[in-house]
Image: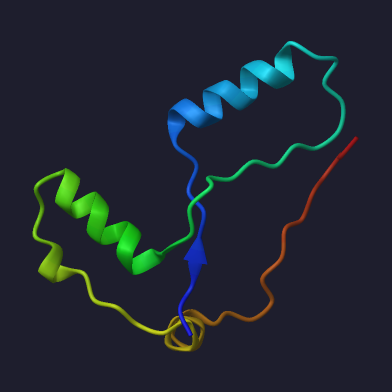
Amino acid sequence: MSAHNSPTLAGNLAEVMLGIVNRDPKGLYHTAGSERISRFEFASEIAKNFDLDSSLIKSISLLQLIVKYETKNTYIHVIGGH
C-alpha cells in the first residue's frame, strides 16, 4: 500500500481562489488536482523537473512510513479560538 495524493497546480489554485473571491465566501473550501499520483512518483517528477538525481528517492510502503514516524500524544492545542 502506498500513499497517493492529488496535488494542486499553482495556476489551478489561483483560478479557484479567484472564483471564491468573486462570490460571497463563507465556510471552508477544499480543492485538489484532478490527477492521482503516489508520493514516490511526485518526488521523482520534482527531481526530474529540477534536474536532480532521482535515484536518491526510494519508494517505501505507507505502513513502513507510519511505523517509522509513529508518534504518541500528538495533538493541536488551540488557545483563544473564535
From this view, report whether residue 29 is shown above or below residue 45. Answer: above
Name, please, the residue furthest toward the top: 22
Identify the residue at horizontal 80%, vertical 37% (top origin).
28
Q: Quadrant of residue 22?
A: top right
Identify the residue at horizontal 10%, vertical 53% (top origin).
52
* Image quadrant containing the C terminus: top right
Q: Quadrant of residue 38?
A: bottom left
Q: Nearer the viewer, residue 64 or 49?
A: 49
Q: Nearer the viewer, residue 68 or 42?
A: 42
- Residue 19 percent coordinates (x, y): 68, 19
- Residue 12 percent coordinates (x, y): 51, 30
Q: Quadrant of residue 18?
A: top right
From this view, report whether residue 70 is shown above or below residue 50. Answer: below
Identify the residue at horizontal 50%, vertical 42% (top origin).
8
**Colour option used:** rainbow
Name, please, the residue furthest toward the right: 82
> Relative to residue 22, is residue 51 drawn left or right?
left
Identify the residue at horizontal 53%, vertical 47% (top origin).
34
- Residue 70 percent coordinates (x, y): 54, 82
Q: Nearer the viewer, residue 40 or 71?
A: 40
Q: Nearer the viewer, residue 70 or 33?
A: 33
> How many tags in the picture?
0
- Residue 73 percent coordinates (x, y): 69, 76
